[in-house]
Image (cartoon, rainbow, N blue to C red):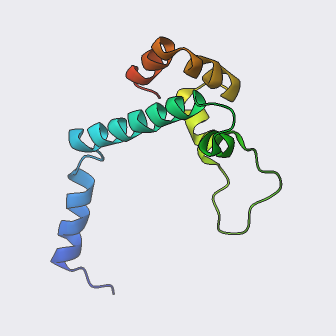
Amino acid sequence: MSKIYIKNMVAKYYFQQRPMENNRTKRYKFRNKKRKFRWIGHTLRKEAGEITKAALLWNPQGNRKRGRPRNSWRRLIMKAAGRSWNELRFLAADRQKWKGLIDNPCS
């Protein structure tokens, strides 16, 4: 027969009743996403010889080692924006369109 302790019952009740995300968490996530998009727009508008732009545009080939994430940062941004990488590059060239993309909540 298993023993049921009151602290386990209280913890279970607490986690079931607690909302998954509060407004502060959503606000922080949105702010961080906005910062990422601002940095990417800034980097994509740089000149061709810049190291940060070359690193962002670099497309590694092959498989990653075990334990490494499958998605690159670039793929995560494409998923969040819901657009292809070429579309994002063209949008970044026009600051007003890029700002419109950033100000709208992405996904």
Percent from the top left, x then y, of residue 50?
Answer: 63, 40
In the rendered image, the vertical position of residue 74 relative to residue 82, given as above or below: below
Q: Residue at x 64, y 24 (%)?
A: 89
Q: Residue at x 56, y 37 (%)?
A: 77
Q: Residue at x 68, y 54 (%)?
A: 70
Horizontal side, residue 80 vs residue 102: left or right: right
Q: Residue at x 60, y 44 (%)?
A: 52
**Quarter in which the N terminus is drawn:** bottom left
Answer with the quarter of the image where residue 62 lies.
bottom right
Percent from the top left, x then y, of residue 85?
Answer: 67, 29
Q: How many marks?
A: 0
Q: Residue furthest right?
A: 62
Percent from the top left, x then y, of residue 6?
Answer: 16, 76
Horizontal side, residue 28 vs residue 74: left or right: left
In the rendered image, the vertical position of residue 101 relative to residue 68, given as above or below: above
Percent from the top left, x then y, of residue 33?
Answer: 42, 37
Horizontal side, residue 62 vs residue 99: left or right: right
Judge by depth and name the residue closer to the eye, 107 or 100: 100
In the rendered image, the vertical position of residue 65 relative to residue 56, given as above or below: below
Judge by depth and name the residue closer to the eye, 25 or 54: 54
Answer with the quarter of the image where residue 58 lies.
top right
Judge by depth and name the residue closer to the eye, 32 or 20: 32
